[in-house]
Amino acid sequence: MTQTEPEATSKEVLDLTDRKALVVGIANEHSLAWSAAEHFRNAGAELAITYLNDKARPFVEPLAQELSAAIFMPCNVSIPGQLEAVFEAIRTRWGRLDCLFHAIAWARKGDLHGRLVDCSADGFAESMLISCHSFIRMAKLAEPLMEKGGSLMTLSYYGAEKVVDHYNVMGPVKAALEASVRYLAHELGPKGIRVNAISAGAVKTRAASGIEHFDELLNETARKAPLRRTVDACEVGRAALLLASDYTTAITGEVLYVDAGFHIEGMVFH
Ligand code: NAD
């Protein structure tokens, strides 16, 4: 039986038993990556979890323990060798990888809070390297470990495609990330590796607190979205589980919106 031929069962279940998953981007229990990791674990996956640095470790370590993570390592994608070391540990321990969840983004405060017009070249490049190119690097490192196929996921936001006040430099960076998803899906598809993005609605996390007027963004989302509410991290985690599972074996190159429908609205009068 291949991944594309589900066993005929009377009960539908999302099952990741024996799957190996790498989750990069947990800062604390509010992180979208934490919810994804919890859902992967609850579905039976074995996990590799990373933390940014020694300062972040005390917040992430108890969460990794709660998930019984088999691999727990530092990973700052800007420090040469750290990402490669994580994949080497995965190769040594598991010999393969089934699922990767990339949930990292960063921009210099001055660039994030300023106009795109004023964004520094260095700051733009740095944000692009951390928030977008790191996903491409992870795809390259994952490819040889996904001989039987796999699922690569990243997180985007509506500001990639439409102007969202105060999202600034992250808009073009997320646009590049979404385009990268399509190109990676095209290139890795013949190997059975699926590549998708989740475009998450606004959720109060540490990264989100760096965006000015974030509370107004939440209020506006709840006012305008068809479901008349914001989303929570758990809903993003569940969508991640869906994309990691065999329920989406024919879905690749996609941007899946988990935003209470916010993105479909144009001019609304309520
Ligand atoms: P978060 O602060 O919990 O997570 C951001 C993570 O990025 C942190 O774990 C941080 O350590 C990591 N990171 C930053 N620089 C890094 C580097 N150099 N190397 C490795 N890791 C680094 O916030 P979050 O909201 O869960 O963010 C996760 C992803 O979700 C981001 O890509 C963000 O843009 C995206 N997203 C968030 C929202 C939202 O409203 N919260 C909406 C849509 C998309």
Image: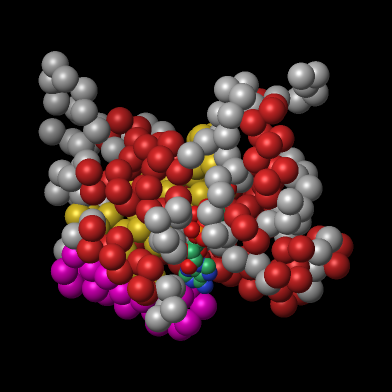
Looking at the picture, how far across and down is residue 121, in whole percent? 76, 74
State whether residue 25 is above or below residue 227.
Answer: below
Tell me what residue is drawn at x 44 percent, y 64 percent: 27
Q: Is residue 145 visible?
A: no
Task: Confirm whether residue 74 shows in the render.
Answer: yes
Residue 248: percent from the left, percent from the top? Answer: 35, 33
> Looking at the rendering, in which quadrant would you find the N terminus?
top left
Residue drawn where x is 18% and y is 72% of the image: 92
Q: Quadrant of residue 57?
A: bottom left
Q: Position of residue 105 (x, y in %)?
A: 56, 62
Front-most of residues 199 and 228: 228
Q: Residue at x 22, y 41 (%)?
A: 43
- Magenta stretch holds residue 116: no
Asked whether 213 or 264 is in front, the reply is 213
Is residue 230 positioned above or below 90 on the image?
A: above
Residue 250 screen position, x and y as percent: 37, 32
Which sits in the foreground, 38 or 5? Answer: 38
Q: Is residue 54 above or below residue 209?
A: below
Q: Is residue 260 left or right of residue 69?
A: right
Q: Split into 4 quadrants, where in the image is the C terminus?
A: top right
Q: Is residue 231 left or right of residue 8?
A: right
Give the total of numbered labels: 0
| Residue lying at 16% horizontally and 20% vertically, measured from the top left | 11
In the visual, does 25 lie left or right of 230?
Answer: left
Which portion, as a residue range, is magenta? 70-93
| Residue 80 among those drawn in magenta | yes
